[in-house]
Amino acid sequence: MIAEPNKSYVFPSLEEATPEGLVAVGGDLSRGRLLTAYRQGIFPWYSEGQPILWWSPDPRTVLYTGKVKVSRSLRKTLRHGDLTITMDSAFEDVISACAAPRGNESETWITDDMCFAYCDLYRRGDAHSIEVWRNNTLVGGLYGVALGDVFFGESMFSRENNASKVALVGLDWQLQQMHFRLIDCQIPSKHLFSLGAESINRGQFLAELENGLRQNGQPGRWQLDISAAMLA
C-alpha cells in the first residue's frame, strides 16, 4: 500500500501560482514530498543548476484512457514492427534514455537527482516504466507515477520511428485493463495532441484528480509482456 503523504509537506495554494503555473521553489525530491505534490496536481520540472521548481499549469494537458489516436503508420508499426512491450522490467534504462540529451540539445531537465528520486519511487511501487523491445534491444519507452486511477506521465523516448508511440499504446491498453481513467501529460505539445491529448482547465483537472485518488489504484510492480501486434 502507498502510505499517505506526510502532512508536513505543504505547498502554496494553486491560486497563488504564476500565470505560467509556477507554484513553489525549493524543497527536495523525497518520496513524501513528491507524492504530496502529485496528489495536489503539482509536479517538479527544472534544469541542472536551478532550484527545484514546482508546477501546476492551467490549462492542463491530459489524455483519457481509450482515446489514444492510432495513425495508419503507427498501426503498421504495431502490426509489422516485430516489437514486444513490457512493463517495469527496465525502469532505470528507460529513465536514463529519457534523460539523454536529444538532437542538438546539450542539457536535460531529468537531472541525476531526478533519476535517483524516481528510481526510488519505482522500487517502492509508485512509479512505472513501459518498455518497447526489438529482440533484446530497448528501442523506446516511457515512465511516470501512478496514484489512484491516474497515471502521471513524465517522459518518453524513441530510438526508432514510432517506438515511443508504441509505448503509449501499450500503456493505454494496460491502464484500461486496470480501470484507470486518466493520463496526465502535464505540458502541451503538438506531438501529444496528435496522439489524442487535450487541454482542460486546472479546476476540471483537479476535480478529475480528486475523484481518481478515491480509487484503490495498483501499487507495486506491474507485469506485461506482449507482442505489439496484439494491439494493432
Image: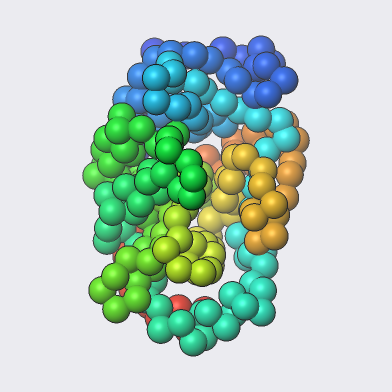
Residue 94 higher or lower than 29, as above or below: below
Give the percent coordinates (x, y) of residue 149: 52, 49
**Which of the 4 image quarters holds residue 21?**
top right
Residue at the extreme front: 104
The residue at 39%/25% (across/down) is 48
Q: Nearer the viewer, residue 94 or 55?
A: 94
Asked where in the image residue 69 lies, by quadrant, the reply is: bottom right
Report the residue at 72% width, 20% height from top: 19
Q: Position of residue 23 (x, y in %)?
A: 58, 18
Q: Residue at x 24, y 44 (%)?
A: 123
Residue in the foreground of this view, choosing between 123 and 187: 187
Q: Nearer the viewer, residue 151 or 193?
A: 193
Q: Is residue 97 visible?
A: yes
Is 66 left, or right, of 80 in this rendering?
A: right
Q: Give the residue at the far bottom of this rendering.
A: 80
For the residue pair 112 and 32, the one nearer the viewer reads as 112
* Picture colour scheme: rainbow
The answer to whether any part of residue 44 appears in the image is no
Q: Position of residue 1 (x, y in %)?
A: 31, 42
For the C terminus, the image quarter is: bottom right
Residue 215 as seen in the image, left or right of residue 126:
right
Q: In the displayed structure, would residue 11 be above or below residue 93?
A: above
Residue 67 sits in quarter? bottom right
In the displayed structure, does residue 90 sit left or right of residue 128?
A: left
Residue located 41% across and 44% down the image: 101
| Number of numbered discs overlaid on the protein picture | 0
Q: Position of residue 127 (x, y in %)?
A: 36, 46
- Whether 217 is drawn above or below 121: the answer is below
